[in-house]
Image (tube, helix red, strand yellow):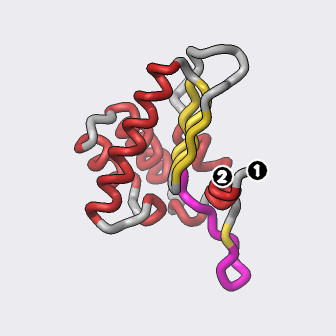
Amino acid sequence: MRKALRDMIAPQQTGGRRQLRAAIIGLGLDGPEIPRRLSTGEHCLILGGSAETHADMLETVLRLDDELERIGRPLGELTPMELAEIAWRIDSPELAEIAWRLEANLEESGQSFDDCTAEELTEMCAPVEL
């Protein structure tokens, strides 16, 4: 496994307490059956998709990285509402929608971001099934 990918998804240990790293994972489902495109960054993993879809996801992540650098904060320090604001500034309504869902589900459950497991956070970000 590439070091950048391993470092992005591996939990960090801080004083005996497990701390998850924030990451954005983009899955392109409109490409070949076997994903042939993989892009990684400090805060992202993009897998699969057609050339156009993969390029669009990569562009969004690059704009996000630029904005995080501009404000001087890592992804993991943002609240869901701050992420939603940034998503609108970088023209990513899909990312803003995910951040709003996460905020609403955290509020509804009475949990904080730091108290949730990666699985709980992932479930909170998922679209509501009708």
Q: CA distance from mark 2 to mark 1?
A: 7 Å
Q: Disc 2 marks which amino acid? A: Leu
Q: Residue at x 40, y 52 (%)?
A: 80
The local secondary structure at tag 1 comes to loop
38 left or right of 44?
A: right
Q: Is residue 31 magenta?
A: no
Q: In this view, which residue lies farthest toward the right?
A: 1
Residue 84 in picture, x, y percent from top left: 33, 46
Instruction: Give the residue pinned by disc 1.
Output: 1
Q: Residue at x 55, y 65 (%)?
A: 114
Instruction: Answer few, some or many: residues within 10 Å of disc 1's Cα (few below 14, many 20 plus, some between 14 and 19).
Output: few
Q: Disc 1 marks which amino acid? A: Met
Residue 124 in picture, x, y percent from top left: 55, 43
Q: In this view, which residue lies farthest toward the left?
A: 89
Instruction: Give the residue pinned by disc 2.
Output: 5
Instruction: Specify whether residue 117 is in view.
Output: no
Residue 10 in picture, x, y percent from top left: 70, 60
Cβ atoms at labels 2 and 1 below 8 Å apart? yes
Q: Quadrant of residue 32?
A: top right
Q: Which residues are magenta?
A: 13-23
Above or below 118: residue 57 = above
